[in-house]
């Protein structure tokens, strides 16, 4: 299948702009497309056959001329294409850049984002979970950018429960929680994510062979 050319995007984009009262010209200065309408700032559109760092860099550079900057790319194909496209739209929103897609088979243009200052919506719940995890994580057991298994708060708390059972034998979850300070000890041992615990009876757990091995490796 032949890869589309950037020039194939121009005619549909030009028609779309002209339908909105703009006068449109291509390759003006460094811009792929420039559209002007009386009383408005000029609109600049950068054309590319797909999202790339170069496209975003060009769009950001055009913001020195006008706030009305768009990128235009061919319409995505398939679920994977849509997922990647959606992610790039989110990035463009953060940059204050508008996004157009062009369906080449019929020239349809769709607006996915208009240029606008980005105002991130903060999540108090996510911030709370992050700070809670930071406070609970003992020491600094990981290396930034590391590959493989990380030491998490959950793992540290599971190791505390395992260590208690190793020293005291089968115990009630409530006792483990009280003595280790792990509030959800009973739930953690019941779920047994790591396979370190064995149920003796309702609410009572002991250390499994995998648990013994984990303590030896910790």
Image (tube, grey):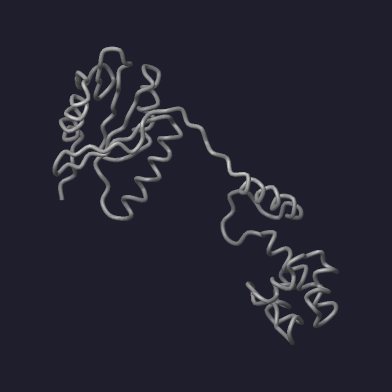
Identify which residue, 65 or 150, lies in the foreground: 65
From this viewpoint, which residue is outermost toward the bottom? Answer: 201
Query: Taking 110 as reference, is 163 left or right?
Result: right
Q: Residue at coordinates 22% horizontally, 37% vertically from top-left?
A: 109
Q: Is residue 61 left or right of residue 145?
A: left
**Number of marks drawn:** 0
Q: Position of residue 87 (x, y in %)?
A: 40, 45
Q: Quadrant of the C terminus?
A: bottom right
Q: Is residue 177 above or below residue 76?
A: below
| Vertical arrangement, residue 139 with respect to residue 52, above or below | below
- Residue 141 x, y percent position in the rendering: 71, 55
Instruction: Identify the residue shown where x is 29% and y is 29%.
Output: 46
**Residue 71 position by quadrant:** top left
Residue 74 sits above or below residue 95 on the image: below
Residue 91, how many percent across, how many down? 43, 38
Identify the residue shown where x is 70% and y is 79%. 197
Tell me residue 35's x, y (percent): 24, 20
Residue 157, quarter of the rendered image: bottom right
């Amino acid at each position: 299948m032949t890869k589309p050319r950037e020039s194939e995007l121009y005619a549909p984009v030009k028609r779309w702009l002209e339908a909105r009262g703009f006068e449109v010209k291509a390759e003006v200065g460094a811009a792929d497309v420039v559209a002007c309408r009386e009383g408005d700032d000029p609109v600049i559109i950068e054309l590319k056959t797909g999202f790339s760092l170069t496209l975003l860099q060009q769009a950001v550079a055009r913001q020195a001329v006008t706030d009305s900057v768009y990128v235009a790319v061919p319409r995505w194909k398939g679920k994977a294409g849509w997922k990647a496209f959606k992610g790039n739209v989110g990035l463009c929103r953060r940059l204050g850049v508008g996004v157009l897609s062009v369906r080449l088979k019929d020239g349809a243009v769709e607006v996915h984002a208009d240029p606008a200052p980005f105002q991130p919506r903060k999540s108090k719940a996510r911030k709370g979970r992050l700070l809670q995890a930071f406070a609970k994580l003992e020491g600094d057991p990981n290396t930034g950018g590391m590959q493989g298994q990380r030491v998490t708060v959950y793992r540290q708390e599971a190791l505390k429960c395992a260590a208690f059972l190793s020293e005291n034998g089968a115990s009630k979850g409530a006792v483990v929680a009280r003595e280790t300070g792990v509030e959800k000890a009973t739930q953690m041992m019941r779920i047994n994510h790591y396979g370190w615990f064995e149920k003796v009876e309702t609410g009572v757990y002991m250390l499994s062979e995998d648990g013994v091995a984990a303590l030896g490796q910790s």
